[in-house]
Image: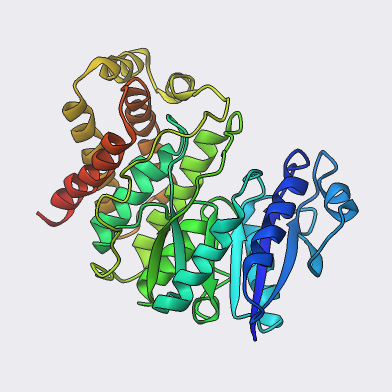
Amino acid sequence: MSRLLIGVPARNEAERIVELADHIESGAAMLDSSYESRLALAYQTSDDDTLDRFMARSSGLPQAVLQSPRSLVGKGANVKLLVRHALADGDDYLLLVDADLGDYDPRNLVRVIDAAERHGHSLVLPLWCRPQGQGNTTNYLASPLVFATHRARVRQPLAGHMLLHRSLLERLDLDALPDDYGVDIMITLTALGTEVSVGQVPLVAPAHPSKEGNSERVMVEVTTAVLHALERLPATDRPDVCWPERYWDGWEWPRNGGIESNHADVIVQRAATTEELESWLALREASDVDVAEMWADHLADAVRRVRSPYPDLARIVDDLVCPFFVHAEHRAHRNTSVAELEEYVADLGIRLAARLHG
């Protein structure tokens, strides 16, 4: 009998928590009788009735609520609660599903479990597509940077959906994991660094609504986490981690999450002078190649600086904010297909790798 804990980190997710829990339970019911599944909500004090709605629903699975101290706010704190719970209970697998994936397809749960069992993966990540214009930190920073530093083709290193086997859970340094949005990329980098098997499975993409004002916070927290890891962890070469050839064939853009981008607003707030602001905004009309080269130059420079003696990590991250959002703003105005985006992300990783290793 294999024990599966399905963990949902949540704060202010009342609108979607019941729908998600119902879909998760439907997926667990599709597993064969060799699995003992449970559901856990890792909850932080919210401004809505997330907890009340979760507790009031009729549950078909044994369920638990894990609550972070009121002083802690951040996804990573909830994830660490779930990891500790899974380890203490002797679970074989922990499936993490972000609470905002309300229309979650139950078959996704079965597919990741099947991939882990068939291939012995300790970490299974999704291959899916965010709505057009979303996922900028994943597309233009995390995925290319993981390739450039580890030679690992990981498309969704911070997807909000990951299956962890106990062999990986036991390798996580929970005290070192961040309490914020950087937690997913740190789990991914731990898997790459400890050389456990990492798999990627095409899944049905859920609607993934953006939250107003979140883009800068996500970018800063993820960038801080990954650069800090590059500063202190030894480089690991993982060319064995690779996505399937043309996995995106047949994909179309999912429906939009409904929040307009605030890229230009971030640039206006972050630019140090009027002249700097004008130079950044002028790049919106530059060629695709020029903007990609600009962003690759800045990101490669950040990696070099963080690996130098006594790096100022906060300053390095701060220096990346404007070029990142210039790049995201430029990409937001490109009318591309899913295939063109996927090929662009792969090429960006190659450009960055050439700078770091050329």
Q: How many marks?
A: 0
Location of residue 180 in the rendering, given as x and y in whole percent from the top left corner: 59, 52
* Residue nearest the viewer, comparing 356 with 306: 356
Q: Nearer the viewer, residue 242 or 298?
A: 242
Q: Quadrant of the C terminus?
A: bottom left
Q: Is residue 59 above or below residue 45?
A: below
Residue sitting at x 43%, y 30%: 132
Image spot of residue 176 (x, y percent) = 53, 68
Q: Is 7 left or right of 345, judged from the image as shown? A: right
Q: Is residue 197 above or below residue 210?
A: below
**Quadrant showing the N terminus:** bottom right
Q: Position of residue 282 (x, y in %)?
A: 28, 14
Quarter where residue 320 is shown: top left
- Residue 157 seen anywhere in this rendered image of the structure: yes
Quadrant for residue 161, please give it.
Answer: bottom right
What residue sits 49% from the left and 51% below the top? Answer: 159
